[in-house]
Image (cartoon, rainbow, N blue to C red):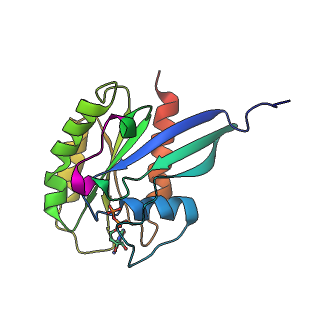
């Protein structure tokens, strides 16, 4: 006999953004509490599972990483389908990864079944342990104008990583 499910909610959370901004590193820091300076971009991980408790609720998260496919621009509907949360990641050291966020947002609007409206979006400025080239205020203002949450993080030093996932989960739980 199957008992009750071991969780109250199942959420699919995606990481998107340019190559090498740190998407896999953010995922691995959160799910395995590990960091690798020489992470191979072809690591090939599709998704990882992580349990989290919020109040008395158990949340099961599947966290999806692009596994390098963004290089070939082959992320399509199946990747986006069913996602409740999307983290758009840029590298604070490389302004071009910030400039490309509009393209990523367009992609969400094209491929996410709800055209990106009924999904929680969080902008993550990763690698804050490095010298920054993208001002925090600029990123914050852009995120606000797009109705997105925002924070800066470092998968290397752990700053902001847990908070990023918590903010997304809280916001999903608050959504109608
Ligand atoms: P992805 O292609 O977006 O998945 O990026 P990766 O997670 O493969 O990271 C690309 C490179 O940046 C790797 O060499 C990581 O070790 C490095 N990296 C990722 N996050 C950070 C960070 O917060 N700080 C620093 N200094 N390096 C990072």
Farthest residue to the bottom: give it: 38
**Vertical position of residue 106 compared to residue 96: above or below:** above
Left/right placement of residue 51 relative to residue 171 reads right
Instruction: Residue 8: tell me if it is visible.
Output: yes
Figure quadrant of residue 136: bottom left
The number of callouts visible is 0
Figure quadrant of residue 32: bottom right
Can residue 164 be found in the magenta stretch? no
- Residue located at (66% from left, 33% from top): 8
- Residue located at (52% from left, 71% from top): 34
Which quadrant is home to the N terminus? top right
Q: Position of residue 4 (x, y in %)?
A: 78, 30
**Vertical position of residue 125 compared to residue 86: above or below:** below
Q: Give the magenta part as a residue range.
A: 70-77
Left/right placement of residue 44 relative to residue 113 reads right
Q: Position of residue 113 (x, y in %)?
A: 34, 26
Q: Return the residue nearer the eye: 32 or 75.
A: 75
């Amino acid at each position: 006999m199957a008992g009750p499910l071991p969780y109250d909610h199942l959420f699919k959370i995606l990481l998107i953004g340019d190559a090498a901004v740190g998407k896999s590193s953010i995922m691995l820091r959160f799910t395995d509490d590990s960091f690798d300076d020489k992470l191979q971009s072809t690591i090939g991980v599709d998704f990882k599972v992580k349990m989290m408790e919020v109040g008395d609720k158990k949340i099961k998260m599947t966290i999806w990483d692009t596994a390098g496919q963004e290089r070939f621009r082959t992320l399509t509907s199946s990747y986006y389908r069913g996602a409740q949360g999307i983290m758009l990641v840029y590298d604070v050291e490389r302004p071009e990864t910030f400039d490309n966020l509009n393209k990523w947002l367009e992609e969400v609007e094209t491929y996410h079944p709800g055209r990106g409206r009924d999904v929680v979006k969080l902008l993550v400025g990763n690698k804050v342990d490095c010298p920054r080239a993208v001002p925090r205020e600029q990123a914050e203002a852009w995120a606000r104008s797009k109705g997105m949450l925002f924070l800066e993080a470092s998968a290397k030093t752990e700053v902001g990583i847990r908070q990023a996932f918590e903010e997304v989960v809280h916001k999903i739980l608050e959504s109608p």
